[in-house]
Amino acid sequence: MSSRAEESPPVSIVAAITVGDPAAISNTLAAISGQVYEPARVVVVGGDAEGRHTADEEGAEWSASLSALLASLTTEVSHVWVLRAGTIARPDALATLLEGAERTGSAVAGSKVLQLENPESLVSVGIATDVFDTPYLGLDDDEIDAGQYDVVRDVAAVAGASMLIRRDLAKGVAGPDPLLPRQAAAIDLCQRARLRGARVVVVPSSEVMVPLAATETRLWREDAGRIRAMLKVYSVLTLLWTIPLDILIGLIEAIVAPFLGRWTFFAWIKSWLWNIVHLPSTLRERFAARKGRVVGDAELFRYQLRGSATLRSLSTEASKRLRNRVGSDEALTLASLGRDLRQPALVIGLISLGFIALATRAIWADGLPAVGYSLPLPTSGGDALRAYAGGWNPSGFGSVEPLRPFFAAGGLVQVVVFDNVRWASTILIAGSMIVGVWGTNRMLRTWGVEAVAGVLAGAVLVAGPATRAIAQDTNVPTLVAVGLLPWAIRLAVARWPATRRRQIGRVAGAAWVTAVIAVLSPPLLVVPSAAVLLWAVLNFRDMTAWRAALVSGVATLVAFPALLPWVALADMNALLDAGEAFWDPGVVPVGAIAIALGAALLAAPSRLADIAAWGGLLAVIGGLVARSSDLGGGREVEGLGLAAVALGSAAIVGATFESVRRVDEVTGWKRLIVGLGAVAAAVVLAATLLVVAPGRAGLPGDTLTRQIGFTALSSGDPASSRILLIGPEDALPGDSVTIEGAGYRVVSAPMPSLMEAWLPASTSVDTALALVLEDLLSGETFRAGEELAPFGIRWVISVGDTPLEEVFDGQLDLIPLSTPEGVALTMEEIVPVRAYTADGQAWARSGSGYVGPAGAGTLFIAETANGRWGPDWQQAEWGNQLSTVDGRVDFATIPSRQNQAVAAGVLVLVLMGVSWWGRRG
């Protein structure tokens, strides 16, 4: 002990041992009893009955919780020494810790932590964090302690294995958070202490040792704790930019980590779900943490790393592996390349990730292109969810017709990314591609296909000829849903678990994945069960295949209610008949797939031939469905057929490439056939590169922005008005209506959202507009602006040659506009809006409703008449007349639909929970 400690009056310290493993308490107590500077009291904290029993046996005090202990401490106690059970402190650890704290005037001081099994190996010498509270120790693996860090210094946090806290501060911040794991709890405590103006230092001369097992914590718990720590200490302004960035970094880590041998996606999901569940207690803790603060976020930033510690760790690990691989003596030998092909995490995995990034780069930058049935996502995910759950369908002039379930999934994604439309679009499209490649690999591995062939097959699933046809048809919901198909099949055909709990979890897992597929694209609900049934028929003697068919069938039935309320109200005939199912595939891809299939059937090992046969039947049946327009099939039916073709093509390509790896199992002429099949499969694979150059995942280029985007620059509030688009049906976005051979439709200005792609059934307002257009065509009126203004139509824009173009060009109260392409006209003297008062005052759109000055008066809303609009509703011809007293009008949600939507969401969450429960079993 130092002379300073000898001269100072004795300081009363309470040693608190927090119980993790009760069996480890004895060693920690023995180390405390051997301290040069002995604490006045030793208290075992927590551990319930077992911890209390151990404390009684060792002759130590016991407290149920650290907060209870802190509340009982009097002013005679100056410090609390918090240790974890299992920590072995060197004899002078407390003395040097106290001396370092007093000399620096620090309220929190931590020890150097070493490995108990190897006392020369460093575990922690203070903790640095980034702004997301991710810890960064700055140590190499198995770094030896040579005194290189032996200087007392300020740090972001100290290890929870041994920390000395001033009693008044410990009571003021209520001690460590009992809900958090070790490291996150230490970081959280130190941050809350620093907000109170306290100094946090590490004292390396104070040494403690911990067992290696004590440093291991489940990833998701630490991640959840770090998020909770952020939410508790940062200002709202800081959280507004850190939370979205943290979500993005978590997604990047989930994508990259599998190629480094880790799986973080489900841990990432669980960490955020945990924080949602515990949000009320987090908010209470946040209020307490920030109530007595004397410094701001800038003081926390002083001790944090720049950038992301997660991304730094990923790049360091990847570069280390690459250096080790390239720098080895066998870097370019045939044997090493063969091993790479058998372990493709760093080769095929990174290539596929780069491929997806290139194939979706335009969506990263701009979101979904505005063309056909591909339109930008709604600006508010919450509005989309409310509209789906019994709210107002904004397409055309609006209706109560239910929106497609896709908007429930899309709206939820938007809410998670704080309504960033580009991020949401990227997660849906690029995320589907990543999940599709990964899922195809996992599905084929179930049948013995190794990773290289599985990843290449996954590329064909997400970017092959059939999926590219889905994209060219701008069927965005089906394009997103395709990526989940192999997961639903894999969960059904994988090895059946031995325990009942895992069996229930397996069925629940297949059910929730099938439910998500159905929500994204309802017609695809039948694809997984039909595909697994087809597999069972081909392997009719294999009872496990029939059990898989039963599992998939049950999963489909359980998943069906997830489509409520849409499925109870939708006109299924109209859904399946709309458009034409006429896929016209090219000769080259069809020929290449046929050759690859024939080669696999003739020459591949038997199991691979079975996979190829299954894929071939899926492709043939799907191709016939995709060309069923003569039987009444529409666009949705074509999308269903193309999804089956994509799945079948992937299976054929995977089996063919795997037969090359296993070519030593065949002899003679069969080897030549296998080689021919591989060439054909390579042609199919090469076709996936066609999506890379445009960078839109196969979707066509944006045309609508060029045609109507200028309206955003108009005077006033463009979003309060509508656009009448005229032109050929195939040039108009989404659904359209025809009149005397001319196509037209009404959309919101300045750009319609994807919710407006599908028009509801015609109502009285649609009939009224059709009569106006008939009068214009017949020449009975030449004042189109005056006739269209009540509908809120401010612009008439042509997107292609049409008879209506000449009619509108001759109107007296329309003036032409200079546009990049096509013809555009607007009103000469008035600015029509969708909602206006009796004295002509315009109201602005706000979500699905309208806002304006409050006061006694009447408001006319140019939406389809419905009694659930606003107060004091009356029907005015085809529109709505309301009271303006409240200054806001909204469509009142239909309770029964809202309840059904909530029930559907709860069903999916319960299935996810049961699936996780089964996996944990």
Image (cartoon, grey):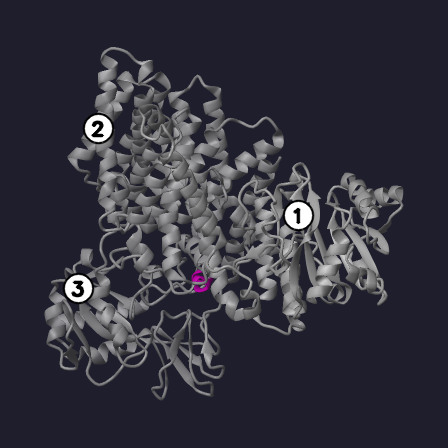
Near mark 3 (Cα within 10 A), the count class, few <14, some 14-19 or many ≥20, is: many
Q: Amino acid at mark 3?
A: Val
Which secondary structure dominates the residues rendered in magenta? Answer: helix
Highlighted range, magenta: 381-387
Residue nearer the viewer, 3 or 529: 3
Mark 3, residue position: 799
Q: Is residue 408 left or right of residue 703?
A: right
Q: Decide which of tag 2 and tag 1 comes sooner along the chain.
A: 1
Q: Is residue 635 above or below residue 367?
A: above
Q: Are marks 3 and 2 in contact (CB under 8 Å)?
A: no
Q: SS for tag 1?
A: strand
In the orientation shown, which residue stands out farthest toward the front?
3
Near mark 1 (Cα within 10 A), the count class, few <14, some 14-19 or many ≥20, is: many
Residue 780 visible somewhere in the drawing: yes
Q: Is residue 428 above or below residue 258?
A: below
Q: Is residue 540 left or right of residue 678?
A: right
Q: Quadrant of residue 727?
A: bottom left
Label 3 or label 2, whichever lies nearer to me, is 2
Q: Amino acid at mark 1?
A: Val
Residue at left 64%, top 43%?
215
Mark 2, residue position: 680
**Which of the numbered marks, if any, corresponds to residue 113?**
1
Residue nearer the viewer, 76 or 347: 76
- Tell me residue 600's x, y (percent): 28, 21
Q: CA distance from mark 3 to mark 2?
A: 41 Å
Q: Quadrant of residue 652?
A: top left
Q: Are marks 1 and 3 in contact (CB under 8 Å)?
A: no
Q: SS for tag 2?
A: helix
**Screen quadrant of the N terminus:** bottom right
